Image (tube, grey):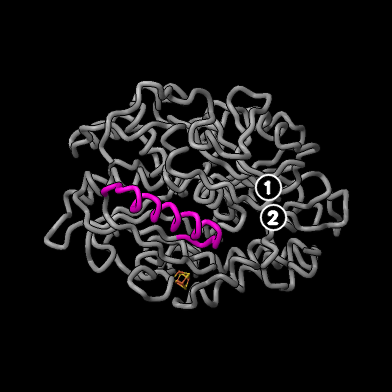
């Protein structure tokens, strides 16, 4: 594996970094953006090892643990799975916690956020880039085992074929096992991933210890999103300066985002953090945008009554000024046909049904929150709904065994705070939505609950 990088390989420029070579990747009009994958078509365009090496070159030689740690520290790569945690801090924690058990490396492609497709497309298209990142991390930690936790069937086939291809071509690296991730919103949480790899249920585990200290079978475990590992592979090839050429000091590099909802070209885009949200939505074919849910179901709403609210850069500073984050890289778009409060109530109902059924406040509290929120959304009794929410939320918040209930409460708060005007209209039995509501952000597989039935999923 450790061979000199070919002199003919040139680092990708512009936003096509991870998606360089993907069959569907095309240039779009903005210089900070690449369309990387269409959600509506099946993608079966796996890049084999020769093409992968031809696109990116081989991994360079001399990647000692010290070089890897120092390079990733200087790169300031943040996790692409949702929390945005600095990758090197996880790496350092695992290295410090190493004991006789040795370390374990886990790449998470469970993509339990229903609207996200970026990890699926990455694994279907270029599993070798992720495997390179895993190889670098395992070598730096001296880890003896590694796993890819993955839900999508086609992606499982692609990654299994890539592992076989590497073995057949004599690539020396730690054995990587593929573990199937079941569906379910909580199946991608860190402790759920660890339990599943240990052959248990993919449900959260109650533990005060971080998986970086005690994860798979008690071993310190480096668990990160697959896109993060892909960035590791590129940074170690092309260096810190190249990586940081795009983005800002605190938010460098490109990221994959999934744009869904009321847009003509839903799909996965590779974007630079300086890109304006309005430019991205224009490229995706969004018009008459009324609101955006940023970061996924546990993200936050942005209201766009005039459209100018979308004119800001998708970097960490601009987002935090608006109390938003990219989260799992999902951008859900609503146009003026859709009431965001009704849409949010459908999502809350779906999430209430995703409780792992292990903690009373979550099992009993989330359905109550959903029912109260539905009163507001359906204008059946808005005041009662608001009062009930005020009463029940303190009984649930911070009282679950995992972040699930707090994530749901965050979405409820964001909806009530962002769309206060809309809720006032609902109080009068009116709604500003122009069309008859059809949900655009609920997964097709969501059970048909009361809200989903009412909103015409
Ligand atoms: S808080 Fe909810 S989702 Fe989390 S472990 Fe408890 S029951 Fe499961």
Side (left or right) of 22 relative to 385: left
Indicate left or right for 318 with 215 as reference.
right
According to the picture, the residue beneath numbered tag 1 turns out to be 260
Question: What residue lies at 57% left-to-right and 41% top-to-bottom?
Answer: 257
**Mark 1 Cβ inside 8 Å of ligand 1:** no
**Range of magenta residues:** 150-172
Percent position (x, y) of residue 59? 32, 35
- The answer to whether the residue labelled 2 contacts the one labelled 1, judged by CB atoms less than 8 Å apart, is yes
The CB of the residue at mark 2 lies under 8 Å from ligand 1: no
N-terminal of the pair, mark 2 or mark 1, is 1
Quarter assignment of residue 218: bottom left
Residue 93 drawn above or below residue 367: above
Please name the residue that numbered disc 2 is placed on. 441
What crowding class fits label 2: few (fewer than 14 Cα within 10 Å), some (14-19), or many (20 or more)? many
Left or right of 238? Residue 393 is right
Q: Pick the residue in front: 42 or 83.
A: 42
Residue under the point 74% across and 46% down: 334
* In the image: residue 19, left or right of residue 290: left
């Amino acid at each position: 594996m450790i061979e000199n990088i070919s002199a003919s390989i040139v680092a990708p420029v512009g936003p096509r970094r991870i998606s360089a070579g993907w069959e569907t990747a095309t240039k779009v009009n903005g210089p900070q953006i690449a369309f990387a994958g269409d959600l509506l078509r099946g993608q079966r365009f796996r890049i084999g090892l020769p093409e992968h090496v031809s696109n990116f070159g081989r991994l360079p030689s001399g990647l000692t643990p010290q070089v890897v740690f120092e390079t990733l520290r200087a790169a300031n790569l943040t996790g692409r799975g949702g929390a945005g945690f600095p990758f090197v801090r996880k790496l350092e924690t695992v290295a410090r916690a190493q004991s006789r058990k040795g370390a374990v490396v886990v790449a998470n492609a469970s993509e339990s956020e229903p609207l996200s497709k970026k990890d699926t497309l990455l694994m279907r298209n270029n599993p070798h880039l992720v495997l390179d990142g895993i190889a670098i991390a395992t070598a730096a930690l001296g880890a003896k085992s590694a796993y890819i936790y993955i839900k999508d069937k086609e992606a499982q086939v692609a990654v299994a074929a890539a592992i076989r291809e590497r073995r057949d071509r004599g690539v020396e690296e730690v054995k990587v096992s593929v573990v199937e991730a079941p569906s379910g919103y909580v199946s991608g949480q860190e402790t759920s991933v660890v339990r599943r790899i240990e052959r248990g249920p993919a449900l959260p585990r109650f533990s005060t210890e971080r998986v970086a200290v005690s994860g798979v079978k008690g071993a310190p475990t480096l668990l990160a999103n697959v896109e993060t590992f892909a960035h590791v592979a590129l940074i170690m090839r092309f260096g810190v300066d190249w990586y940081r050429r795009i983005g800002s000091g605190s938010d460098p590099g490109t990221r994959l985002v999934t744009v869904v909802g009321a847009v003509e070209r839903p799909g996965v885009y590779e974007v630079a953090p300086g890109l304006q949200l309005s430019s991205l939505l224009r490229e995706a074919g969004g018009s008459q945008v009324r609101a955006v849910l940023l970061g996924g179901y546990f993200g936050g709403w942005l209201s766009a009554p005039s459209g100018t609210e979308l004119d800001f850069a998708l970097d960490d500073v601009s987002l935090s000024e608006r109390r938003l984050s990219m989260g799992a890289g999902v951008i859900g778009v609503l146009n003026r046909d859709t009431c965001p409060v009704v849409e949010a109530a459908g999502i809350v109902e779906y999430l209430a049904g995703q409780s792992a059924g292990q903690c009373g406040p979550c099992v009993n509290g989330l359905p109550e929150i959903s029912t109260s929120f539905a009163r507001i959304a359906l204008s059946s009794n808005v005041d009662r709904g608001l009062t009930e929410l005020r009463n029940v939320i303190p009984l649930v918040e911070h009282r679950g065994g995992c972040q699930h209930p707090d994530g749901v409460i965050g979405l409820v708060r964001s909806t009530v705070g962002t769309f206060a005007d809309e809720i006032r209209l609902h109080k009068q039995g009116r709604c500003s939505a122009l069309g008859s509501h059809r949900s655009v952000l609920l997964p097709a597989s969501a059970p048909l609950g009361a809200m989903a039935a009412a909103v015409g999923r």
